[in-house]
Amino acid sequence: MAEKLKVELVTPYKKVLSEEVDEITANGALGEFGVLPGHAPFLTSLKIGELTYKKDGALYHMAVNWGYFEVENDTVTVLVETAEKADEIDLERAKAALGRAEAELKGLTPEDKNFRIYEAALERALIRVQVAGKAKL
Amino acid sequence: MANLKSIKKRIVSVKNTRQITKAMKMVSAAKLRRAQENVVAARPYAGKLAEVLERLAASQEADANPLMVQRESRRALLVVVTSDRGLCGGFNANLSKAAERFIRERKGEFSELSLMTIGRKGYEFLRSRHTVRKHHGNIFSTLSYQTAALVAQELIEGYLAEEYDEVYVIYNAFKSVMTQDITLEQLLPIAPKDQDNEEQGVEYIYEPSKAALLDELLPKHIEVQVFKALLESVASEHGARMTAMDAASKNATEMIGKLTLIYNRARQAAITTELMEIISGAESIKG
């Protein structure tokens, strides 16, 4: 299969990725999905989660925060608020954030205004730890 | 001459001032470069988001989302973005004046017009003249997407709670180091772009659904617009300060030159008088 997907991943701070990849998977609003070259035009929102792409046989992992995912004509455009490559993640910090979020959540009820905030923080931290772990494989 | 000493003092004081303005110029130059990079870095995101939004909105009914509905009543909110600190030439004054002009000229259109200020300078200028609904100070020192998003969310909440029906933002857009463009934009309601659907032939798969995507995308669009406005303003501020400080340093140098000339002239005059006194004294002794 000679065809490739052209991926552009941008955040408000910078263009993180601009590459040709073989395959890309992400965590969409309705669950995880994968995209191969030749995919039909597709637009979805992304949840906090992991984004994986395959290039020349190697897998790359990224932790992404809320965003959009668009496929058109073998061009993938991903808009996310934050994106971190697996080897860029500071595992210690992510673990510390995880601990903090957990501790905060314990003292809160789901009705609390801050509950959602810490829940999201917990999710983000979890994904970061998970993705960072894969960098070493 | 008695004022030799006072001229000398002036020279020293002007030199000190020049030192400060020069240092400020350097700092601004460094900050400007960073701010400029941020502006450039945020552009692709804003651009792509606008693209996706257009495609979505084009195929939707105009009143698909409350953020796109033009309401009957017209109570407006003007967001004025200035800087927290002064010493940047006409940066804040020009913007405040432009805001004044907007208020004066378009007051008739709206049934009510209130203000939100971002940045201390604009707040100080406008608060005595108009009702400032809300003021955000000190957000530039810790400017990030998150802070911009908070401001945007506040705007959206107020809009949805029908505290106001239209939101405008006025800020200094970064043109180049020397020039800032005062820009007025309508944030809310989001005006759907009039475009003919010639090349909209591609059928997309939408997940979860078009309307749900639009619901999520529109607030993000506002956030990005606010973020962009703040970034532009910061870059402009540093540009303006850099030019102002450069001009101030040049003026100081010029002034030092002039004062040195006066000083030397006075010194020479003093020496001549002294010499004359000595000679005439010697003459009188001789005689």
Image (cartoon, rainbow, N blue to C red):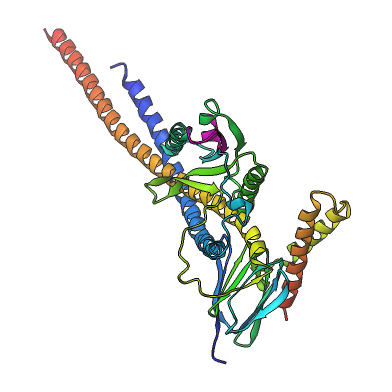
Image position of B188 (left or right of B161): left
Quarter placement of the N terminus of chain B? top left
Residue B278's image quarter? Answer: top left
Q: Measuring 39% from the left and 40% from the top, which residue is drawn there?
A: B244
Q: Position of residue B216 (x, y in %)?
A: 65, 59
Q: Which residues are magenta?
A: B108-124
Q: Is residue A123 above or below residue A58?
A: above
Give the residue furthest to the bottom: A1
Q: Measuring 68% from the left and 43% from the top, which residue is drawn there?
A: B161
Q: Position of residue B86 (x, y in %)?
A: 48, 36
Q: Is residue B221 above or below residue B255?
A: below
Residue A61's image quarter? Answer: bottom right
Image position of B78 (left or right of A80): left
Q: Position of residue B26 (x, y in %)?
A: 44, 47
In this rendered view, identify the residue nearer to me: B286 or B129.
B129
In this rendered view, identify the residue nearer to me: B266 or B89.
B89
Question: Looking at the image, can residue B118 be seen?
Answer: no
Q: Measuring 68% from the left and 64% from the top, which residue is drawn there?
A: A65
Q: Is residue B199 magenta?
A: no
Count up the numbered dots.
0
Image position of B217 (left or right of B86): right
Q: Is residue B120 magenta?
A: yes
Quarter placement of the C terminus of chain B? top left
In this rendered view, identify the residue nearer to me: B126 or B285.
B126
Q: Measuring 43% from the left and 33% from the top, which residue is drawn there?
A: B105
Residue B119's image quarter? Answer: top right
Q: Position of residue B172 (x, y in %)?
A: 45, 45
In this rendered view, identify the residue nearer to me: A59 or B185.
B185
Q: Is residue B209 above or below residue B145?
A: below
Q: Is residue B64 above or below residue A34?
A: above
Question: Looking at the image, can residue B61 be seen?
Answer: yes
Give the residue furthest to the left: B287
